[in-house]
Amino acid sequence: MESQNRKGFKIAALMNFIRKILPFLILFCSLFIASCNTTGKNLNENIYEADYLPLDEGAFIYILTEAKKTQAILEALNLIPVNDKQFLRILDKTQTALIAVYSENQKLYQVTAYGKYPSSSARFALAMSRDWKRTRTKDTREVYWHSKRDYFSIAVNKRQANVLIGSSLPAGTGREITADSPFYTKPGIKPPEGFDNFRKNTIFSCWIVNPANTINKYIAEADLPFEIPADQFFISLDEDLHSGRYLMHMRFDFSSVSQAKGISSMMGIARNHYQPVISMSGIDLLMNILFTNIPFQKDNSLTITSVLGADRIALLLKLFAI
């Protein structure tokens, strides 16, 4: 009888101990599972592995950027001229942003951003604001918020925010959904050949659509008898730890190896006669980069490398419809 009482006491003590530590076990398991979910695979790795990017077609320039590491550049570009506090709080949580610029004549952007967003509180704050109206897309009935006053829309969940800045996307983007919807039309935009390898391990990358027309227009405005018939034009940035600035790589792809070699030779001749401009506009900066640096040729591409500060990079990017 005494042994049974002892056994019952031990069982009761064990159960009491389990009840006491159970909340801590649950908390520990929750934290462990959460850490596994966030550390096993990079949050944005699936973006870069995708064949298509979550943006619509028809833009002048497409940008991929690590927002925190390029914050100075994004601020200098003033890509999102919005002072709404709720909107800015959401953007402050952004880790990676994909941006498409659709118009040369007005600010018209589409943004797909990834981060860790307080989606419930954000939606509540938007609902409490008079400037925001809750609405849905016509086809899929997806929910987003629209500010008619500032001409932009946003949809947000815990991991992703879709933003449209401007009244609507222009004709030719293939969109079949609501004009002010921030959602892209699936499957999205396919990056040009060679871009995926070019932008790997960079903190900023972009490609310019129909680059020859744009670049040659600026070369003509600089009164230089020269043209660059590039099929593709990419820009990427890395952090330059020595100077605290950015290491910029500018790559031109041509139709053949011989054409790339010929352009490189012509750029060498132009470099011998070009006088760098100290007080620079965006065009002057572009000409300085093109004709004071020696391009590196690999196959049918030429790459020019330069070290620039955030203000200079923003000045350069503003040439391309930003």
Image (cartoon, rainbow, N blue to C red):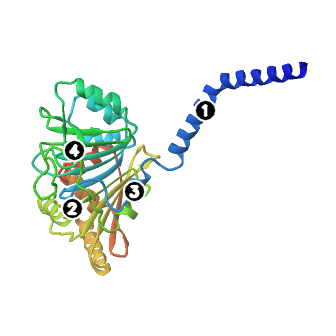
**In terms of sequence position, does the residue under pointer 2 or pointer 4 come before the other?**
4
**In terms of sequence position, does the residue under pointer 2 or pointer 1 come before the other?**
1
Horizontal and vertical percent for residue 163?
Answer: 24, 42
Horizontal and vertical percent for residue 189?
Answer: 26, 59
Mark 4–mark 1 Cα distance, whole angstroms, equals: 39 Å
**In terms of sequence position, does the residue under pointer 2 or pointer 3 come before the other?**
3
Which amino acid type is marked by label 2?
A: Val
**In terms of sequence position, does the residue under pointer 4 or pointer 1 come before the other?**
1
> Against 130, is 250 above or below?
below
- The residue nearer to you, when weighing 26 against 93, is 26
Q: Nearer the viewer, mark 2 or mark 4?
A: 4
Which amino acid type is marked by label 3?
A: Tyr
Q: Tell me the crowding category of disc 2: few under 14, some 14 to 19, or many 20 or more residues within 10 angstroms, Cα based.
A: some
**In terms of sequence position, does the residue under pointer 4 or pointer 3 come before the other?**
3
> Against 259, is 233 above or below?
above
Mark 3, secondary structure of its residue: helix
**In terms of sequence position, does the residue under pointer 3 or pointer 1 come before the other?**
1
Mark 1, secondary structure of its residue: helix
Pointer 2: what residue?
209
Pointer 4: what residue?
141
Q: Hey, which residue is sitting farthest front in the picture? A: 1
Mark 3–mark 1 Cα distance, whole angstroms, equals: 32 Å
Disc 2 + disc 4, Cβ < 8 Å: no
Pointer 3: what residue?
48
Q: How many marks?
A: 4
Mark 4–mark 3 Cα distance, whole angstroms, equals: 28 Å
Pointer 1: what residue?
28
Which amino acid type is marked by label 1?
A: Phe
Q: Nearer the viewer, mark 4 or mark 1?
A: 4
Seen at 55% across and 44% down, the residue is: 36
